[in-house]
Amino acid sequence: MLDSLYIGATGMNAQQMHVDMISNNLANVNTAGFKKGRLGFHDLFYRAAARTDPALAGDLQGQPGAGVGTIQMGKIFSAGELKKTDSPMDIAITGEGFIEVVLPDGGSAYTRNGSLQVTRDGMLATADGYLLRQHIQLPADTMTVQVDGGGKFLASVPNEKNPVEAGQLELVRFVNPAGLSALGDNLYAATENAGELVIGKAGDPGFGTISQGYLEASNVRLVEELINLTIAQRAYEINAKVIQASDEMLGISNNLWR
């Protein structure tokens, strides 16, 4: 009977973490380029027993188990809807690929948020101030900026009939994007689980194209998240009732001695 108290507690803890994940998804529903997170569940007892002694796994089928645990499953990198902004400094990737940026320590990070800005030195950077890995610099007298589908930046300057090429944006993709490690600010770091890093130009085989004047919206679906929230809440309540029922049964057992 004491096992049911512990099992119910693991269920409540797991559903609380599920609600935390859902709340983070909902909070970022309007964050450009945001990718929703997901949470996995696994049986604590059988998973631990099979790991320590696989021969025991077949002998445990009659046992009730020891509750549920959670595992972070990373991000879901399905594409979000393209939102038109009409800003020439906004770009969206239609298809596969990430924009590589430079971290303050010189390392690399990857993002799908194409909201760009121009620094004091004319360098292109993300809205959070991270420079693009290609170090694209616009002329000081740039009037307008054009970005073609292949990621080439063209700047219109005075006394020049044709736009001047300012730089070429390259994209990066991974075999398993779900294996990337989230850093915050819509940035991700490469890991062994993400697989091999492949660099190419927009429009190359396996890579998406660039759309200027658009941003990729969050891939969070409100209706889906609200349904998951309701399910998680009900599961939490049921696990709480399990603990309450177990406590009442223990009370009945204790009263038998009186």
Image (tube, rainbow, N blue to C red):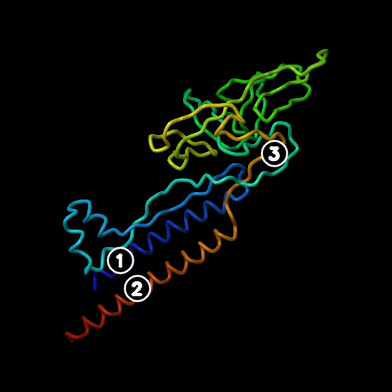
CB within 8 Å, label 3 to label 2: no
Q: Which element type, helix, strand or loop, lies under badge 3?
A: strand
CB within 8 Å, label 1 to label 3: no
Q: Is residue 246 above or below residue 89?
A: below
10 Å neighbourhood of mark 2: few (<14), some, or many (≥20)?
some
**Circle 3: residue type:** Tyr
Looking at the image, the residue that sits furthest to the top is: 159
10 Å neighbourhood of mark 1: few (<14), some, or many (≥20)?
many
Which marked residue is nearer to the observer: mark 1 or mark 3? 3
Location of residue 98 in the rendering, given as x and y in whole percent from the top left corner: 55, 34
Looking at the image, the residue that sits furthest to the front is: 205
Decide which of 254, 166 is in the foreground and name it.
166
- Report whether 20 appears left or right of 219: left
* Residue wearing tag 1: 7
Q: Which element type, helix, strand or loop, lies under badge 1?
A: helix
Q: Is residue 25 above or below residue 214?
A: below
Residue 211 disc label: none
Task: Measure the C-alpha gap from mark 1 to mark 3.
Answer: 48 Å
- Report whether 79 appears left or right of 71: right
Location of residue 253 in the rendering, given as x and y in whole percent from the top left corner: 22, 81
At 29% from the left and 75% from the top, the residue drawn is 246
* Residue wearing tag 2: 242
Quarter where residue 221 is shown: bottom right
At 47% from the left and 39% from the top, the residue drawn is 177
| First reached walking from the N terminus: tag 1 or tag 3 | 1
| First reached walking from the N terminus: tag 1 or tag 2 | 1
